[in-house]
Amino acid sequence: MLALLCSHLVVALVALVVIGGVTRVMEAGLACPDWPLCYGSLLPGRQMNLQVFLEWFHRLDAFVVGVALLVLLAVSWLRRRDLPAWLPWAATGALGLVAVQGALGALTVLHLLEASTVTAHLGTALALVLAMAALHQSLLRSATAAPPPPPPWSWRLAALIAGLLVPLQCLLGGAMASRWAAEQCLSQGLDCRWLWLHRLGAWPAALSLLLLALLSLPLPAPQAPLRRFALLAVLLVPAQVSLGLLTLRLQLAQPAVTAAHQLLAALLVAVVGALWGRGLLNLPAGLGSPTAAIPTPSVLREAFRG
């Protein structure tokens, strides 16, 4: 049941990132001038239009995510004797990230879409997507009767690098978008450094995913999910690059194309999160108990343990 809840949370978080991006493209970030209400009510009536709906629905999705994480937190602590010992702490951390995300969402409105705040808001959302995808796959791995051994250290190193570079590349895109740098560069030749950085960052991110896919090919049958996720990530890269180029060719005039570009970016982050949960973190599958020690291993130590 908790694994199913986590899978729904991954979908809701990916949707949250995409709706937030569409809200920005449609210049609807301040369509609701107050926070947390919208025009002083839970459901604005007379003021409702497309822009108000986008901002209102973005907040609604964030609220649903928060409630679902509260349920996950409560269940994981109440049933901690029957669940992996790391789960309550992971749920607590995820809820803490949502609290930070909500605070940054409020500041984006109160600070009138100040660029660094908007970028931090996106960064926290991407961290949530990565963490929840990793948590979901860790739960599935823990539920297997005999979890497979960890993949070789070379694979884990490649997964660690990809899991850092892909969200960083997405964050560069968010920093560029929050400053409207692409529009200014294409129309006036101003502030082009952000567009250049985003293009430059695409290469190491794509190559890290390609390397991870190549290292996944010889993995044994019990680690087939790692191979599937890695190959899926590689398949998403050409589509993502093509959408990015098309977005610039259309000079960001087609919100649907820009939204599709943001959707694939969020999906890539979710896939590398799944790879972390399945093959990098190797969280213990042992159940909690009153006397069990609470595992607090360093991620890097776990990643490179032989």
Image: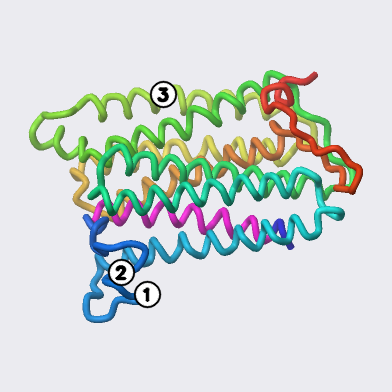
Camera-near label (3 vs 1) is 1
Residue type highlighted by circle 1: Leu
Q: Position of residue 82 (x, y in %)?
A: 86, 55
Visible residue check, residue 227: yes
| Secondary structure of the residue carrying numbered label 3 | helix
Q: Is residue 89 magenta?
A: no
Q: Quadrant of residue 58?
A: bottom left
Image position of 232 (left or right of 259): right
Q: Position of residue 253 (x, y in %)?
A: 19, 50
Where does label 1 land, which residue? 42
Camera-near label (2 vs 3) is 2
Q: Nearer the viewer, residue 61 or 288?
A: 288
| Secondary structure of the residue carrying numbered label 1 | loop
Q: Which residues are magenta?
A: 4-26
| Residue 203 tag number | 3
Q: Are marks 2 and 3 in contact (CB under 8 Å)?
A: no
What residue is at 59 percent from the left and 37 percent from the top?
231
Judged from this view, the residue extending furthest toward the bottom is: 46
Image position of 284 (left or right of 243): right
Q: Is residue 194 above or below residue 170?
A: above
Q: Nearer the viewer, residue 119 or 97?
A: 97
**Sooner in the amino-acid sequence: mark 3 or mark 1:** 1
Image position of 278 (left or right of 94): right
